[in-house]
Amino acid sequence: MYESFLQKGQSVRRKVLWPLAVTLVVFLILFLIVFQAYLQRELTRHLDSHIDFVDTLYRDFLDERSATMLSLISLIRRDDALAQAMRDQNREELFRIALPLFNEPLQDQEITHFYFHNPDGTNFLRVHKPERFGDRIGRKTLTTALKNLTPSSGAEIGPLGTFTLRVVVPWQVDGKLIGFIELGEEVEPLIDQIADQANSQLAIMIDKNLLDKNLWQEGQKMLGRRTNWNLLAGHVVNATTDLQLLDELPRVMALASRNSVDLEIRLKGSDYRGRTLPIIGAGKQSIGLMVIFQNINSTLTDHRKSMLLVALFCMLLGSALFISSYIILGRTDKTLKVARQKLLDEIEKTLLTNKRLKVEIADKNHAERALQRAHDKLEQRVAERTRQLDQQNDLLEKSLAEARRSKDRISGVMRSVDDAIFVVDADDRILFINNYACSLFGVQQGEVLGEPISSAIKDSSLRNRFLSTLNRKVGGREFDFEINQTSQQSPQIMHAKNSILNSPEGKYEGMIFLARDVTRNRSMDRLKSDFISVAAHELSTPLTAMLGFSELLLEKNALTEQEQTEYLQIIHEKTVTLTRLLNEMLDISRIESGRKLELFFENCRVTELFEPVVRQYQKKARERDIKINLAQPDLFLRVDTAKISQVMENLLSNAMKYSPAESTIQLFGEAENDSYHLVLRDQGIGMTPEQLRHAFDKFYRGDNADRAIKGTGLGLTITRHIIEEHNGEIWLKSQLNEGTEVHILLPLSA
């Protein structure tokens, strides 16, 4: 009997390891299934985002081209000679004047269709096909313009199956309608631009119901395209970004018609996933489909690598666990075997003792044996119960001690956080308030604990806002409030939100308030708003000048060569100004995104680096005395000359903006150890300590209220990043009404 009990203990390792191995395999399989499902979900999410991006890009392209054609038509209908020829119904004269416009500026803008229509909607002249005229045009864009006498635009299907973006504008002279002007541009070439920007493969398919088969085949043959009317059931293919995609379309469109899953193809060794998108024409009806395929090679590769690494890690971990369990259970089996053998020996000894005891007590009466057994059982139960009570008491004391420690830790954390926290009970009395909240409201913790909330908040309007929130007994409310601190020039802005305290039974027991300092966030929001306003103004000023002088050049043929040169010079200067502003915005965008500026280092002499920029400003600003004195002018610095020129232009521009006429601007420098120390000093308005502290902050301008001084608040921010990218240093020294000094240290070339 005891030997069989000992043998049963030898199967422990087998009974544990087999279930463990099966469990590890099941977990690995489940992991692979879940990982695959996650991959499909991520691919679908990426595709959704990509489809939205392509759709937006397509619409933006159409809107941009429509706006361009509207601008061109606006210029065309201002031509008095064209208007007179149209009023006289002189087709030859109209064609003679319009043809140069079509051959140069319009075709340069990729315009392929140029029409003049009569007021009744019949075609008077096709400049691109002058031999065809007199037919009535029934396209939606023209009928809409004819009906409403307002500009109309949209993408339409031509009789030969061409997909064209058209813009039609009523032509009125002295309040009288003399006809319509129409420009058109083929949409298909835009597809390659969209595909390049979106890194996609695209195809345009037109509904067969909108086309005449013979005319479509004729048009495609004329354009030199591969044609196959029967390639697809309900559509014809007008454009694709890849000929191999044309061969794949029948299969993927058949798959799309049977179910709604995403389409998958393989082109030139790459995997693509795609989806169809309706194409909406000028009449707001669907005229076909755009098939969009996104390259998913990198995503698949990354997920497969991740899955392989995790699976390998799981296998290694499982193997290690299995091997360690095998060793540990083997040792356990040996230990159990020894323990069972000892237990067997003890049982045998106990049996022998019991036999002797039975012999010794055989003569005692039954009552004494029964009494003794009852007494023994009672003592055993008392001892067991006492032991259990002792264990429970110990456990209770440990739990109470741990609860006190947890409470102390939570209280310490709440007191030390950087946000103001206070808790009130159901009677609006303060249960807890941390140090920051006490400092914020100017109270002592011992004075307000257990008191109504009104005792802690002295300001009546702020107190009413908190009491209103308490009266509503609704959590998740948020609001801003201001605290006036005597040590600060502007009020401190706090953002408060609350949470409800409920009992386990759902009864309202109080409320927690948390207030966070958002002064800097609100200040940055305000600075960004100011920047947008300033940037819009800075952009509109050169654009307005460019537009005005370009219209003069286009409209007035009698301008002298000097006037034309002067106007072109102004347009060029405004273009340079606009380019500099856009480059500043691109630089700050690159800095904001965490990318380093792209620098091209070369060795350059001190004089060749700084003097050309100063000479330019000496010519432009003759009312100011700009002096330059550079010691050791033949020293070499290893710099990006273009970026350092940008730095000097920013600094010289600021010095001229903020210093009066007839003042002196000085630039001097000298070598110091392994660097060249450059100082730019002006006699301008200077800066206060507050302005000096924020001078390098993005969007910050010394006096945002003064719009007379132009600027976006980005110049010094970009300047600092350029200098730091050169491993240099820059700092300012300034006093109000006494001018400003800019100090720059740049390393010397090795």
Image: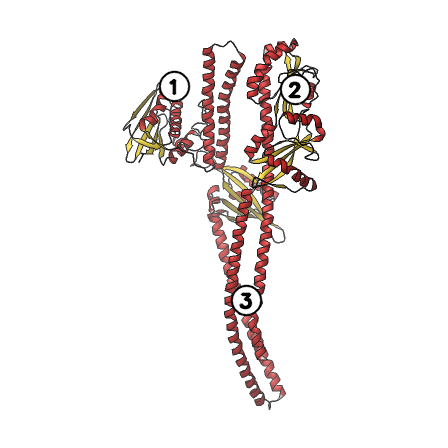
Percent coordinates x, y for residue 739 in the rendering: 35, 26
Q: Which residue is mark 2?
A: 150
Total of numbered circles in the picture?
A: 3
Quadrant location of the C terminus in the rendered image: top left
**Marks 1 and 2, Cα distance to the nearest angstrom?**
48 Å
Drawn side of residue 8 relative to residue 207, left or right: left
Percent coordinates x, y for residue 648 in the rendering: 37, 27
Most foreground residue, 503 or 703: 703
Which numbered disc, 3 or 1, marks the residue that appears first in the sequence? 3
Percent coordinates x, y for residue 7 in the rendering: 57, 75
Residue 707 visible in the displayed image = no
Q: Nearer the viewer, mark 3 or mark 1?
A: 1
Looking at the rendered structure, the secondary structure element under dot 2 is loop
Tag shown at residue 620: 1
Which numbered disc, 1 or 2, marks the residue that appears first in the sequence? 2
Amino acid identity at mark 2: Thr
Tag shown at residue 392: 3
Quadrant location of the N terminus in the rendered image: bottom right
Which numbered disc, 3 or 2, marks the residue that appears first in the sequence? 2
